[in-house]
Amino acid sequence: MNTDYQVIIIGAGAAGMMCAITASQRGRKVLVLDHANKIGKKILMSGGGRCNFTNYTIDAENYLSNNPHFSKSALSRYTQWDFIGLVDDYGIDYYDKGQGQLFCRKSSKEIRDLLVSECQKYKVRIELKTSVLDIKAFPPSQESEDSKTQDNQDSDGSRFVISTKNCDYQCDSVVIATGGLSIPTMGATDFGYNIAKQFGHTVLPTRPALTPVIFDQKWRDKTQTLPGNSLKVTVSTGEQSFTDQILFTHKGLSGPAILQISNYWEPGMPLVINLLPDLDAAIWLEQQRVERGEILLKTLLSTQFTQAFSEFLCNELDLNIKLKQLQHADLNRIQMILNEWTLYPDCYEGYRIAEVTHGGIDTNDVSSKTMESNKQSGLYFIGEVLDVTGHLGGYNFQWAWSSGYASGSFV
């Protein structure tokens, strides 16, 4: 069995596979190692099994990072149009779900199979069920100094030994594409962060992102009639706002608007929800009171919300009366809850169902052009393991494709 490679990538997910394809197209001898029993497990389950593989509109502003400029270079060199072109080459049918979010019409398996086919075309070797036990870097020997290739002319010639249970592998470049901590049932671990620390990198604090939020028990009891109710709202925290659906669950709130705002919200911060984002509630209420004074407030609210949510609001306001009976103070209270309903969720639902991990390896010690470590030549970090977190809507997959391509162009 051959154990000597030019490039070894740890992680057979979206970023790792894209790196492998790009490097192998350049003639590099590539091995991909993964402890999982399947390639691209998160790809297969993403988007409800249809994989939101990119977005028509990709910009660095769609990403959170301690270094907000870091993602610009990679995103500009391998764009959404590049990946869409690859999808088109394979005849994969896709559709825009809204807001530029592109999903496979049939199955996310098509994206995974595309990546596998490209790897097979360029003779990438993939070893599954293989856990990496240790990575060691050795300084260049005189022989390696004399035999630098044109592609690797900027390398210092360091060699790596990667130890697994079955054997030790050697290589010139190591790429860490092991992802973050989200969805541990898919095999997520802190391996990438530990390797980064081993080589002197700073790992910024991590937390779940693109995740539902959970109410405390008091609010769960209050909202026990609401699970399954969905509303289009504007959710805000601090200076960030998103307009989309929210969904009441047995634990708290989910839905696209909540997943988006979870990238910015932290426990203790308020969530301000505009339940009528297209209406000025004060003007609407006064107009309805004049024109339809005989109907109950609950009946009016049912024209905008589900019956269950309308009853919930009336119970919160303690107002089960006709519109004409509303006093000025009542109108103010109703307007506030409709346009500025302020909640204090207890916590995130957590890594168990979070789509991505916020935080990670500090990008200030990683080249934005090549993804190579500034601490250790020949060591690269790509994808979710870095402190780059995209919005909901295909942005995190595009970061995987772009960062994988960037590293694959230089390893």
Image (cartoon, rainbow, N blue to C red):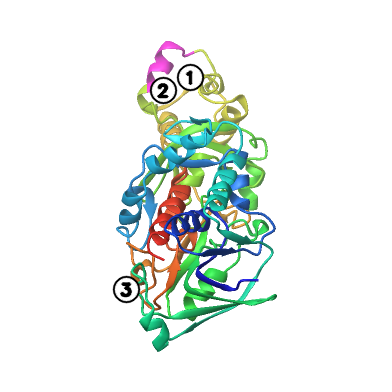
Q: Is residue 78 above or below residue 306?
A: below
Dot 1 corresponds to which residue? 323
Numbered tag placed on residue 154 in the rendering: 3
Task: Say what amino acid the circle numbered 2 marks.
Answer: Leu
Dot 2 corresponds to which residue? 285
- In the displayed structure, does residue 309 sit left or right of residue 369? right
CA gap, disc 3 and disc 2: 68 Å
Please provide percent x and percent y for residue 59: 33, 46
CA gap, disc 1 and disc 2: 9 Å
Residue 287 is a magenta residue: yes
Measuring 50% from the left and 74% from the top, which residue is drawn there?
171
Task: Say what amino acid the circle numbered 1 marks.
Answer: Leu
Q: Quadrant of the C terminus?
A: bottom left
Magenta residues? 284-293
Determine whether the residue tagged by mark 3 lies in a helix, strand or loop: loop
In the rendered image, the residue lying farthest to the bottom is 142
**Circle nearer the viewer, 3 or 2:** 3
CA gap, disc 1 and disc 3: 75 Å
Pointer 1 with pointer 2, Cβ within 8 A: yes
Q: Nearer the viewer, residue 350 or 79?
A: 79
Residue 262 in view here: yes
